[in-house]
Image (cartoon, grey):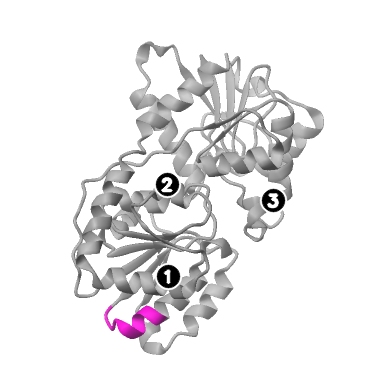
Amino acid sequence: MRVAIDATPLIGSRTGIGVFVEELLRSFRDYIPDDADYQVAEYTLSLRARMNGTTHGHWVPLPAAASSLVWRTFRGPKIEKFVGPIDVVHGTNFVVPPSKGPRVISVHDLSFLNQPRSFRNSNRRFDYSVKEAVNSGATVHTISEYVAEEIRSRYGAKDVRVVYPGVEQKRAVVKTIQESPTLLAVGATNKRKGLAEFIKAFHSVARQNEKVQLQLVGPAGDDEEELDRSIKALPNEIRSRVRRLGFVDREHRDELINNATILVHPSHYEGFGFPVLEAMSMGTPVITTTGGALPEIVGEAAWKVRPGDVDALADAITELLENEELQKRFSVAGFDRARKFNWRDTAEGMFDLYTSLL
């Protein structure tokens, strides 16, 4: 079996989709037996990557932003023209090309519909792309049961398969109350991430706890200006305890997550939620929300509040900071929960999905 896989998300800074693709390809190499008669043909949709020499595998001479429109309008060219004979093609990022054989499209969430501000002009393009794939018989892969139900409801899709991403399991570290406790948020500064609301909650927490620190990690997004205003509105002494680190590499991010007292993920909507799972895999207690698929992923191993409820978020942070025993309970429960999500199961699940279509 030869499978063409879109590796375009590997270009540039790693988002959640990029992490998924990177780890999926690595897991195929690590966990699929050599005698499985299996090959991957990676392809890249990016003119800039071609010019920079950063393509992965075969280059498809279409810009990523225009590929969906071209393929939807002309029903071609088929992906085999660029990658050679294949048995299955897997579009990993909301777009799947025409092919002579079965097609799989990964739809990681519907935030382009639920929170369109984050996508500007891309929301309509993604919507059309997914709709075309469903209507033309492609199998839809997604990463949570929550999103699967959204896809069935929105597009009337019949063949939707859930294969969860995994997480690299770290050794559990039982956290203790530190002299200067640190709250950490990881994610782009998009409106749906709830970071401006988190700043308001931090203001309340910091008035009661004179030592608590806040670190914000992630690239700039559509709510950057509002987040800046929220931080500038803080009293000087509290504002001095807020550090914005921007985008950091994976090793640095892991170090920050491991050293945090609590990871706070106040998102209004997630199709999965990599930061919460990564934190739980390190034994870092998590406070998150009931937004989207987050309850499905964290189970009872994290403290959950309603999205946008600033007072409830502040109360949860304050209580967890003050309760060492509760921190330990969430640390252990989170580590155990994270063990249910591993990349071996992801690789085997996707392999089974591909073979079921032949």
Residue found at x 32% / y 44%: 338
Where is 64 relative to 178, above or below? above
**Region of the chain picked out in magenta, as a range:** 204-211
**Sooner in the amino-acid sequence: mark 1 or mark 3:** 3
Q: CA distance from mark 2 to mark 1?
A: 19 Å
- Residue 153 picture location, percent across and down: 67, 41
- Which of label 1 and label 3 is nearer to you? 1
The correct choice, above or below, for 62 with respect to 299 in the image is above
Please, is residue 3 above or below residue 229 in the view?
above
Residue, disc 1: 313
What's the residue at 56%, 62% (across, down)?
190
Q: Are marks 1 and 3 in contact (CB under 8 Å)?
A: no
Position of residue 66 measured from the top left corner of the image (x, y, whole percent): 72, 41
User: How far, Cα to Cα, is label 3 from label 2?
Assistant: 25 Å
Query: Which residue in the structure is indicated by mark 3?
Result: 123
Q: Which residue is mark 2?
A: 297
Asked whether 352 falls inside the magenta stretch, the response is: no
In the image, residue 180 lies at what x, y percent? 23, 75
